[in-house]
Amino acid sequence: MSRLSHKSWWLVGLIVGLAIVVVAVVQAAIPDPSGVIHACYRSNGNLRLVDKSSCTSNETPLTWNQTGPHSATNAR
C-alpha cells in the first residue's frame, strides 16, 4: 500500500478547506435566494445583517427586498 507524501496531504487539506469555505459562503448568502435581506435592530441603533432571521430577544427582526421600490422614471 502506498503512502501519501507530505505534499499530497497538504493538497488534500487545501481542497477540503476550500470546499468548506465555498459551502459556507453559499449558505450565508445575503440576500437570500428570494432577494430578501434579513437584519436585527437594537434600540441603541445597532443594525446587523444576518443570513436568516436569528435575532436575540432584545433585537427586532427586519427584512427588506434587494431591489427596493419601483420608481416612475420619465413619467410626465
Image: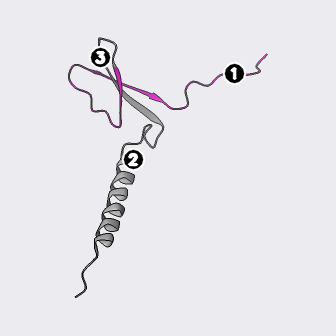
Q: Position of residue 73 (x, y in %)?
A: 72, 22
The image quarter in which residue 32 lies: top left
Q: Judge from the rendering whether residue 2 lies leftward or rightward of residue 19; answer left or right.
A: left
Q: Residue at x 36, y 58 (%)?
A: 19
Helix, strand or loop status at disc 3: loop
Identify residue type, mark 2: Val
Is the residue marked by circle 3 packed among few (<14), some (14-19), or many (20+) residues within 10 Å? some
The image quarter in which residue 56 lies: top left
Looking at the image, residue 72 lies above or below residue 4: above
Residue furthest to the front in view is: 6
Q: Position of residue 67 (x, y in %)?
A: 55, 31
Q: Which mark is residue 72?
A: 1
Q: Position of residue 43 (x, y in %)?
A: 29, 12
Q: Which mark is residue 42?
A: 3
Q: Residue at x 36, y 63 (%)?
A: 15
Q: Which mark is residue 3?
A: none
Magenta span of residues:
47-76
Helix, strand or loop status at disc 2: helix
First-in-chain label (3 vs 2): 2
Dot 1 and dot 2 residues touching (CB under 8 Å): no
List the residue tagged with mark 2.
Answer: 25
Is the residue marked by circle 1 packed among few (<14), some (14-19), or many (20+) residues within 10 Å? few
The image quarter in which residue 9 lies: bottom left
In the image, residue 50 lies in the stretch drawn in magenta: yes
Instruction: Locate the N terminus by quadrant.
Output: bottom left
Identify residue type, mark 3: Arg
Distance, label 3 to label 1, CA atoms, is 34 Å
In front here: 72 or 9? 9
Front tag of 3 and 1: 3
